[in-house]
Image (cartoon, rainbow, N blue to C red):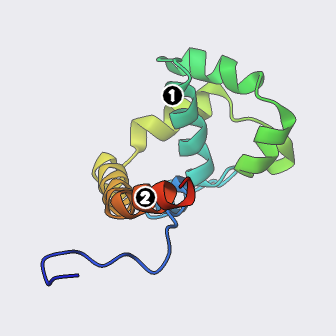
Amino acid sequence: MNENTPSAPATLYVRPFVSILAKVTDFRQQLQYPLPTLLSVILLGLVCGHNTIRRIAAWAQQMPLSLRRHLGLPHARVPSRSTLQHTLAHLNVDDLLCAWQTWVEEARAIWPHAQAHLQLATR
């Protein structure tokens, strides 16, 4: 390996995105739901094609119990539309973008090494 070749990271592990969301500033005074959990519900709803708060809230109501528990929703209760709307209205977008960028950069740094590892494993 020459000096221009990046060394492989110690592990091929990308931390869960929800752990990065914990770095977003929480503006709220009443903490019924952890902010990373609320943001995860919103982002998952968007990824599933629900592009309004109303649709995300309706999707969340149909969310399987196992996913609710996995996301850490207290008592497996999903946030209301008004809770989601309030969260987005007061969200520090710069914090969210910074968290997203950090996560993407970590994932990108590992990806070439993960690809090489997968290729070796399939030979």
- Where is the N terminus found, in terms of image quarters? bottom left
Give SS at disc 2.
loop
- Eyeballing the image, is 2 above or below 38? below
Left or right, 10 with respect to 93, comes to: right
Residue annotated with mark 1: 47
The reply to whether residue 34 is in sight is yes
Residue annotated with mark 2: 24
Along the viewing direction, whichever of 30 and 25 lies nearer the viewer:
25
Name the residue: 53% across, 21% down: 53
Q: What residue type is labelled 2?
A: Val
Name the residue: 57% across, 43% down: 40
Distance from the alpha carbon under mark 1 to that under mark 2: 20 Å
Local crowd at mark 2 within 10 Å, few (<14), some, or many (≥20)? many
The reply to whether residue 25 is in sight is no
Left or right, 112 with respect to 17, comes to: left
Where on the picture, by quarter, is residue 103?
bottom left
> Where in the figure is residue 5, as x and y percent of width and height?
19, 75
Q: Which amino acid does label 1 sit on?
A: Val
- Mark drawn on residue 78: none
> Where in the figure is residue 18, as x and y percent of width and height?
55, 55
